[in-house]
Image: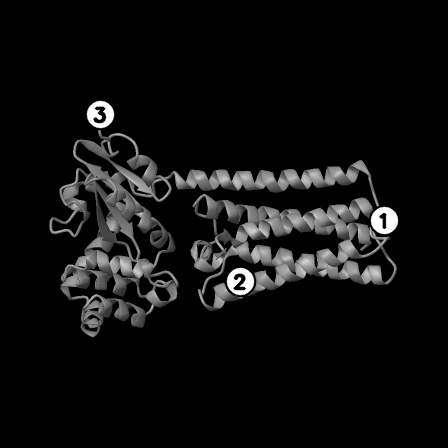
């Protein structure tokens, strides 16, 4: 392959990388769920603290890295490499650093999170090809073959077409993610079950005023990254509503998913904590604990001990299907099945005289900020 053609391949790969990193960046910045293959863990990887460096999502850093490599390949096209290999060395160094970082992140996700992200693996493949392409270009230059300068309109037409495909693709996927975020994944035939009598236990517990006019019923899994990241937002809305909102937490343990094997136990332990008035204390402690620790029996036992609960006895109870705490938890599992809840977290908003409303993380705040749910504003004096 000639150096000029190989450089065009570098340009193509850079724009392909911008597409992948751009989708991941939008998902992170706009709090949208990234479309992912069956059995993959895109959401878990995207929500993990390792996906953010110094307050900046790694995907955003990757996007600008791909952009830099694209600019370098276009400069090589315009100026050529006959006068030196500075642009080649810079591209080679950048692709090498990117490959090292990308491989390290993928290894961490696989070994420590036990998850793979299809988009991240695609980026890994793109970076590897960019590194190999730059290595071949450097080798060709060392043997006397260089990229001749070109100002042909066809070259810029090629770049323009790639830009349209990459950024147009980002726009299309972003639209799909926003449309998916607006959907309410629940069985429409189960609306007869969306009542206070069915969804709210008379004995609570409640976060907020038990007599609040608006009830937010949350179906969540204690090991769900989206539930973990959205819980502070929901808690804040309840606390700042001046007694207008209350939160009811219903269990939807995703125990069949990899990494959620202890979800049933964790949900049952929350019910054990409820018996001692520490239900929401346990929920919040699990969400605030390091994710790797919270997903282990030892980590859950430590949380119980910190709350003054006999952890050994509680764990034994969580393994007994005949225990009252386990039965209460499993009533929630059966309820989610009847409702047809398909994802966590899912919220059902209840208010007397108002038709129940289903929301997700992306729509909850907007719905609650509008009448008839919005907290009453004090009249100006």
Cβ atoms under marks 3 and 1 closer than 8 Å: no
**Which circle, 3 or 1, is nearer the viewer?**
3
Residue occupying the point 29% across, 36% down = 368
- Residue 173 tag number: none
Camera-side residue of 182 and 255: 182
> Whole-percent x and y of residue 290?
37, 64
Tell me which residue sits at (24%, 34%) in the image: 375
Callout 2: helix, strand or loop? helix
Question: Taking the image as drawn, is residue 215 in sight?
Answer: yes
Instruction: Give the percent coordinates (x, y) of residue 104.
Output: 55, 65
354 to 43, vertically: above or below:
above
**Residue 381 - label:** 3
Q: Residue under circle 1?
A: 148
- In the figure, is residue 317 to the left or right of 47? left
> Is disc 1 in contact with disc 2, using a CB cutoff of under 8 Å?
no
SS at mark 3 in the image: loop
Specify few, some or many for label 3: CA neighbours under 10 Å numbering under 14, 14-19, or 20 or more.
few
User: Which residue in the protein does label 2 denote?
Assistant: 105
**Of discs 2 and 3, which sits in the foreground?**
3
Q: Residue pushed farthest left?
A: 202
Q: How many marks?
A: 3
Left or right: residue 202 versus residue 242 is: left
Q: How is the image coloured?
A: one colour
Write down the quadrant of residue 293 in the picture: bottom left
Q: Crowding at label 2, few (<14), some or many (≥20) Cα neighbours within 10 Å?
A: some
Picture quadrant of residue 171: top right
Residue at x-position 43% and y-position 46%: 31
């Amino acid at each position: 392959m000639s150096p000029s053609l190989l450089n065009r391949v570098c340009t193509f790969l850079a724009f392909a990388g911008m597409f992948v990193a751009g989708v991941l960046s939008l998902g992170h910045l706009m709090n949208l769920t990234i479309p992912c293959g069956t059995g993959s863990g895109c959401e878990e990887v995207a929500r993990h603290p390792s996906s953010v460096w110094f307050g900046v999502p790694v995907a955003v850093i990757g996007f600008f890295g791909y952009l830099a490599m694209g600019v370098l390949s276009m400069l090589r096209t315009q100026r050529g490499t006959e006068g030196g290999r500075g642009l080649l060395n810079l591209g080679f160094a950048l692709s090498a650093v990117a490959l090292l970082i990308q491989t390290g992140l993928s290894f961490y996700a696989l070994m420590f999170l036990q998850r793979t992200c299809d988009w991240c693996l695609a980026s890994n493949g793109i970076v590897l090809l960019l590194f190999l392409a730059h290595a071949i270009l450097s080798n060709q230059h060392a043997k006397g073959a260089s990229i001749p300068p070109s100002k042909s309109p066809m070259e810029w037409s090629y770049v323009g077409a790639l830009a349209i495909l990459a950024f147009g693709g980002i726009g299309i996927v972003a639209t799909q993610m926003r449309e998916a975020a607006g959907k309410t994944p629940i069985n429409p035939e189960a609306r007869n079950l969306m009542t206070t009598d069915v969804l709210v236990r008379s004995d609570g517990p409640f976060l907020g005023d038990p007599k609040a006019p608006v009830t937010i019923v949350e179906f969540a899994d204690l090991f769900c990254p989206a539930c973990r990241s959205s819980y502070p937002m929901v808690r804040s809305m309840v606390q700042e509503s001046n007694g207008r909102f209350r939160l009811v937490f219903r269990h939807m343990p995703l125990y069949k998913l990899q990494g959620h094997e202890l979800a049933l136990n964790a949900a049952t332990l929350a019910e054990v904590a409820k018996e001692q008035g520490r239900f929401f204390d346990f929920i919040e402690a699990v969400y605030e604990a390091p994710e790797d620790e919270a997903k282990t029996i030892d980590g859950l036992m430590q949380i119980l001990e910190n709350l003054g609960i006999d952890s050994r006895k509680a764990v034994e109870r969580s393994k007994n299907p005949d225990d009252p705490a386990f039965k209460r938890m499993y009533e929630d599992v059966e309820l989610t099945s009847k409702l047809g809840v398909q994802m966590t977290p899912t919220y059902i908003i209840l208010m007397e005289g108002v038709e129940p409303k289903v929301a997700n993380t992306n729509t909850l705040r907007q719905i609650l900020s509008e009448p008839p749910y919005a907290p009453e504003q004090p009249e100006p004096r």
